[in-house]
Image (cartoon, rainbow, N blue to C red):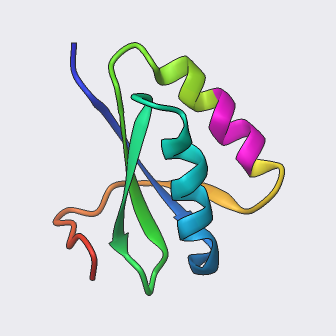
Amino acid sequence: MQTTTRCYRIDRHQISYVKFIIEAYDHVAVLSTLDRHEALVLVAIAPGCEHLFEEIVTTLATELELVAVDKPASPTVGM
């Protein structure tokens, strides 16, 4: 089994909130900021947790803008 990764663009003021919510579900997913100015985040989803992660994202999307985007060619974590 392999970790699934997805990239999202969110309001940069909401990055910490989204990270807190996603990581509150132990062993489901981990969020990393790719570009804090562009508000790009990368989420690594644990194998077998994709369905639960989709439910979390669907619920978050009702509260704030959460847009799936293509992964950048060369991510620069924390930039």
| Residue drawn at (56%, 78%) of the image | 12
Q: In this view, does 63 lie to the left or right of 6?
A: right
Nearer to me, 70 or 35: 35
Residue found at the far bottom of this picture: 37
Instruction: Say whether residue 74 is left or right of residue 54.
Output: left
Toward which corner of the image does residue 22 lie, by quadrant? top right
The quadrant of the picture occupied by the C terminus is: bottom left
Please tell me whether the stretch drawn in magenta is mainly helix, strand or loop.
helix
49 left or right of 46 in image: right
Q: Is residue 19 magenta?
A: no
Snapshot quadrant of residue 57: top right
Q: Give the range drawn in magenta.
A: 55-60
Looking at the image, residue 2 lies above or below residue 20 = above
**Outermost left residue:** 74
Q: Position of residue 6 (x, y in %)?
A: 40, 44
Q: Locate residue 68, reporting x and y percent.
A: 54, 51
Q: Residue at x 54, y 68 (%)?
A: 15
Position above or below: 60 against 13: above
Figure quadrant of residue 42 = bottom left
Q: In which quarter of the image is the N terminus?
A: top left
Give residue 35's position: percent from left, percent from top. 36, 77
Residue shown at the point (74%, 49%) measured from the top left: 61
Does residue 57 show up magenta in the picture?
yes
| Image position of 44 with respect to 20: above or below | above
Residue 44, relative to residue 48: is it above or below? below
Q: Residue at x 63, y 71 (%)?
A: 14
